[in-house]
Image: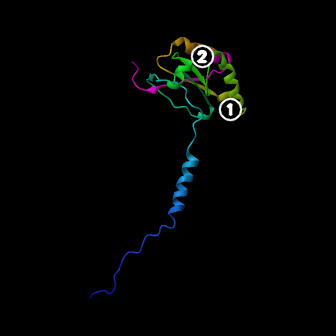
Amino acid sequence: MKKKGSKELPAISTASLPDVIFMILFFFMVSTTMRDQEVLVRYKLPNATEVQKLEKKNLVSYIHIGVPVTHMQARYGTAPKIQLNDTYKTAKDIGDFIAAEREQLNEADRAQMTTSIKADRETKMGMITDVKQELRRANALKISYAAVEGEVK
C-alpha cells in the first residue's frame, strides 16, 4: 500500500504581500502625529507624588523654561530662557502668546484652554512667578505644571 506520486507542498503565494505592506504603511501614516514645535531649552522636570494626565492635549499651550540647548548657547548664553512656540521670549510676551493661542481655538473650547508650564527643576522661582503673573494678566487661569512621577526629595 504505497501511494504513487510525491505530495509536495505548494509554493506560498506572495501576490498579496505588497497590499499588506501598503496597509501597514498607511496605518502608521494616519496614526502618527508630527511634533508641533521644536524644544529649544533643556529641562529636567521636577518630581511629584501625585501626577495627573491632561485630557485634551489639543487645548493645551506649552511654556518651556530652561537653559538653551547646546547649539543655541553661543548666541543666547546659559541663563534660563522662556520658550513660546519656536522662539525665545520674555515674560512680557506671554499675553500676546495666550491671545494668539486662544484665537486658534473655536469659541466653545476657549474656556477650557490650559497652559502647561514645563520648567527645569533648577529654575528660580522668581521666573516662574513672573510667568504666572503674566498669565493672570492674560486671564489664563487654568495652569498645569509638568512633572514626573517619583518621590519628592
Was residue 136 drawn as part of the magenta stretch in this picture? yes
Q: Nearer the viewer, residue 22 or 103?
A: 22
Mark 2–mark 1 Cα distance, whole angstroms, equals 21 Å
- Residue 3 lies in what quarter of the image? bottom left
Q: Nearer the viewer, residue 18 or 142?
A: 18
**Rendering coords of residue 126 (x, y %):** 55, 11
Q: Residue furthest left?
A: 1
Q: Secondary structure at mark 1?
A: loop
**Rendering coords of residue 114 (x, y %):** 61, 27
Q: Are marks 2 and 1 in contact (CB under 8 Å)?
A: no
Q: Which residues are magenta?
A: 134-153
> Which quarter of the image is occupied by the C terminus?
top left
Residue under numbered circle 1: 109
Q: Is residue 131 visible?
A: yes
At x 59% / y 32%, what residue is drawn?
37
**Callout 2 amino acid:** Lys
Q: Earlier in the sequence, mark 2 or mark 1?
A: 1
* Number of marks: 2
Residue 36 vs 87, above or below: the answer is below
Residue under numbered circle 2: 132
Q: Is residue 2 left or right of residue 37?
A: left
Q: Nearer the viewer, mark 2 or mark 1?
A: 2
At x 65% / y 29%, what residue is drawn?
112
Q: Residues within 10 Å of mark 1 (few under 14, many from 20)?
A: few
Q: Secondary structure at mark 2?
A: helix
Q: Is residue 56 visible?
A: no
